[in-house]
Image (tube, rainbow, N blue to C red):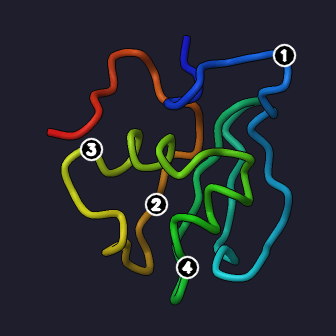
Amino acid sequence: MGGQTDGGNTANTPEVEDTGPQSYAVGKVKQINDYEYRYTVVKEDQVLAIASRFNLQVADVVRVNFPCSDPLNVQPGTVLDIRWPTDSEQRGC
């Protein structure tokens, strides 16, 4: 079972959901199941805005998608897994 990287899950932890396009998070989304999405990065998207769009912390998106690389270098066309990190997903290299 996964959960937030910082602070763990609480009664107030939001569901992972697509709240719709917003500034710097306008890429295409495909819902995989109730708690997981695939997000295709487009020009000028930023990880902070993408995380916010799905009610996630930046650390969660980084832990799942960028364990050993710089999330600031996200490129158009990159497909991100949008979900809570699993316990086995490392933090950093």
The residue that label 1 is drawn on is 11
> What's the CA distance linking mark 2 and mark 3?
15 Å
Q: Position of residue 5 (x, y in %)?
A: 50, 30
- Vertical relation: 64 (above or below) 8: below
Q: Is residue 20 left or right of residue 91?
A: right
Q: Position of residue 65 (x, y in %)?
A: 38, 48
* In front of the other: 55 or 18: 55
Q: Hey, what amino acid is under mark 3?
A: Pro
Residue at 67 percent across and 38 percent down: it is 32
The residue that label 4 is drawn on is 45
Closer to viewer: mark 2 or mark 4: 4
Label 1 Cα neighbours within 10 Å, binned few <14 / some 14-19 / many ≥20: few
**Numbered mark located on residue 67 in the image:** 3
Q: What secondary structure is marked by label 3?
A: loop
> What's the CA distance linking mark 2 and mark 4?
12 Å
Label 2 Cα neighbours within 10 Å, binned few <14 / some 14-19 / many ≥20: some
The residue that label 2 is drawn on is 79
Closer to viewer: mark 2 or mark 3: 3
Q: What secondary structure is marked by label 2?
A: strand
